[in-house]
Amino acid sequence: MVLSPAAHAGPLDDAVDGLAASSEDAIIVNVGRLAALDDPRAIPALSALCDDRLRAGTDGHAYIFDNKTRDVKHPITGAVIGSPPRPLKEVETSNDIRRVALPVLAQLQLASPNAAVRLAAAEELSKTGSAEAATLLHRALSREQNVGVRDVLSEAVARVDLASSSRDARLAALAIVEKTASDAFLSELQRMTAKGPNGTAVETDPQVYAAAMSALSAVKSRQRLIAFGGSLIHGLSLASVLLFVALGLAITFGLLGVINMAHGEMLMLGAYSTYTVQTLFHNYLPGAQQFYLLAAIPVAFLATGGVGVVMERSVIRHLYGRPLETLLATWGISLLLIQTIRLIFGAQNVSVANPDWLAGGTQIAQGLVLPWSRIAVVGFVILVAAGVWFILQRTRLGLQVRAVTQNRGMAATLGVPTRRVDALVFGLGSGIAGLGGVALSQLGNVGPEMGQSYIIDAFMVVVLGGVGRLAGAVAAALGLGVINKLIEPAAGAVLGKIVVLVFIILFIQRRPQGLFAQRGRVEA
Amino acid sequence: MRKHLVGLFMAGGALALSACQKPEEAKPGAAATPAPAAAPADDKGPIKVGILHSLSGTMAISETSLKDVALMTIEEINEKGGLLGRKLEPVVVDPASDWPLFAQKARDLIQKDKVAVTFGCWTSVSRKSVLPVYEELNGLLFYPVQYEGEESSWNVFYTGAAPNQQAIPAVEYLMGKKGGSAKRWVLLGSDYVYPRTTNKILRYFLHEKGVADEDIMEKYTPFGHSDYQTIVADIKKFATGKRTAVVSTINGDSNVPFYKELANQGLKATDIPVVAFSVGEEELRGIDTKPLVGHLAAWNYFMSMDTPENKAFIDKWNAYVKKNNLPGGDKRVTNDPMEATYVGIHMWAQAVMQAKTTNVDAVRQAVGFQHVKSPSGFDMQMDAKNHHLWKPVVIGEVKGDGQFRVVWKTEGPIRAQAWSPFIPDSAKKVADWTYPWACGNCTAPKYGAAGVVAAAQ
């Protein structure tokens, strides 16, 4: 591409300045002019327009505002302007303008030296697929060397060629479509294979029609596969949340037989500990703001573990063997904790921001994006579950815990300090719930009542999985999470929960001890 | 014995503590007692004004600001000398996003506190819960939030938008070229009366515009729901092929995880625009809005509207926030229901001055003719016939700073249609509390023949 001499780039300057016009229609006309000029020097200005960074000076020219350095720059050369003609008015964009500007931006970016930029541009153009894009895309494809970009460009070209008048072009396009089976082609394929009122298809050539039908079924089956995979992955994410919530409860319920209605509030305390750590970092360590989450983990564990130990020592230990009184007492403690948090932090939700490295997501397949925060939670719960397994199976404390669970009297005679084990286990269970609160603070809202919405789920998992068994809690959480997410697309969120509950009730009828029963003689 | 005592003590202590509330709130009301009709308001002493908004629970994110702006407006009126030589005294209660508790608190406000008027409610289910109380005890309620219509009560004045002042224009905008020429629609809402009724109206409207049922997807989530992964993935799948728009009637703090999920999954407004009816500047305050730029909301007022009245309103609000050290500080914003609360309180105040009494029946007659210059710059009038406010419609796109950019608005305020003309049953109903109809939901006037009297709508 030959660039016009910089000294007299008249039409480009005018069109770029026109991007700062006051009327939307004028802006759109100038975007069209830039598309016709096909000059990549317009890229910064167009990109600034789409990002709300374009400014209109009082002299009628356009300027680009740099958010980071707070400089005002020339729209084409990028040179910093020392004294711009203030006041600078922000150029108002809307979806309408962006819908026109983004494809033009992509068109100009097709000639960029950077492969990643070319890739993004090709993807954008394959979405819009206009007739003007066709010639552009063909030209770009013939010049493209990078394999990854070639693939995306072929897809984009195929999309446009599906509407071509040449039979061979359509066949070639359909071959690409069937190979990639991308659902971006769905509407075009449906249009081609749709039957008109007299029964004949829009696509008249029988060979092309057959290829289109086969491509359509390939696209649909890939869509179904991805939807199923997506449900499994979303189910895994939900299962990780359920496991956090239920793990601590499974241990305390298993060991002590204590129905702890305040367990949800341990989650809430963990989330509020995270909020407090975030505030402290914001006030005293603003530079390390992104790492507050790592500091919050031990803080939440120790804080909630401490609350758990205090609860056990002061209230619960006096009520062993009396399930109704424990229920009432722990419910009272849960109200107390909720109200205390309300008095300290206020009754409304507090906002816990995701650190930058957890924001956004990664695209695993077309249409399936997995947020980083959820991947992190799954990883975190695996670590915690492994840690708990290690404690229970490989440490002295774990040995004592297992002994007391199986036969308290015998363990006591053998010199195991049962009372201390009780307190520590309660602390451990609450601490795990606190870690769950840290995870939940990244996924949902943090408010004083957040624990109440999870306590039911916690008990469902524990009842289904069998008390006292780590494996039971894991299996039940996985099962419930996946079933819930598989049903949800068909039945909706509300019905999905109902079905899961009914399933658990029926399961417990057949197998009251849950998935994994406790081994050994259990005390009555 | 000791074990019993410990358990009972803990339970008792917990119950006592849970009854404690923050100092500024009123003491909790006693259980509802069967009541005679409310005693006539006394003529001396301060005029009591009830404020019935959730200050905790899932709706606190939206309703707390309404309580704050109501207190600010009452203070403003008191500084000018109050009404009829008497100061206004706000009575704030917290129904905690618990719908039956709304009814109980409303009853206490009218019977025990003897308020002259109540400003309150957000969700339609809370309004439906208190409606029988206001009608039974002849109280007066000003309801400031957009809703689904299909109602017009003798005892309620609606300062929020009816569907023809919000939902229908928003869908028409998205159908048009500027809105993206949407052909497929996802109707997503919280599971209660407002989203269900609004979506019913929208479905009839879309049918009339030629949209087939297979191009409409309806989904509901319970209050407080926070896992939108599957739903957003479904929206993306539904949108492959035809231009799709999402109409969101999600209410409360579920909006925060919903918008976060939209951002995480990369749902861009230029591809699949989401227009929300219950999300304003306040709900966006806790979210990073940079990935959400371009998504829309339809209201009758935005904080970004550039009028001298709005500047004065925002300045007053900022000063109030600073003086009272409200949480959030200089990040606090104004939004449509706050503006509707402000307008509603001034309308009621004007009516009281005109009627020269706080008596509900007299004030009700006077409210119907009031005009108030709203911060949006428009002159808003109350419609005496259907008890709804004339409101302009404004559609805005989210900006990176959490404010809205106005992309479309009506020339001036338009009249509310309390009964939707799109639903066959309600198309015949008329809400007209003036003579000769004198009813909120009838098909024939009470006093006179329908043929003689031209339809009020």
Image (cartoon, coloured by chain):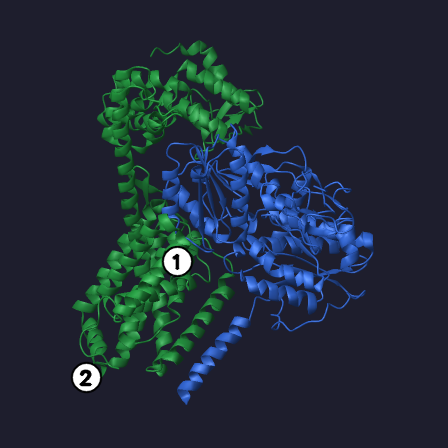
Q: What's the residue type where badge 1 is placed?
A: Thr
What residue sits 30% from the left and 27% below the top?
A: A119
Mark 2 to mark 1 CA distance (whole Å): 41 Å
Mark 2 lies on residue: A410
- The colour assigned to chain B within the rendered structure: blue
Above or below: residue A150 compared with residue B252: above
Q: Residue A103 in the image: x percent, y percent?
A: 40, 24
The residue lying toward the viewer, choosing from B443 and B253, is: B443
Q: Chain of mark 1?
A: A
Of the two numbered discs 2 and 1 on the same chain, state the one appearing first in sequence: 1
Q: Residue B183 in the image: x percent, y percent?
A: 46, 33
Q: Secondary structure at mark 1?
A: helix
Q: Secondary structure at mark 2?
A: helix
Q: Chain of mark 2?
A: A
Above or below: residue B308 compared with residue A282: above
What residue sits 40% from the left and 9% below the top?
A: A5
- The colour assigned to chain A within the rendered structure: green
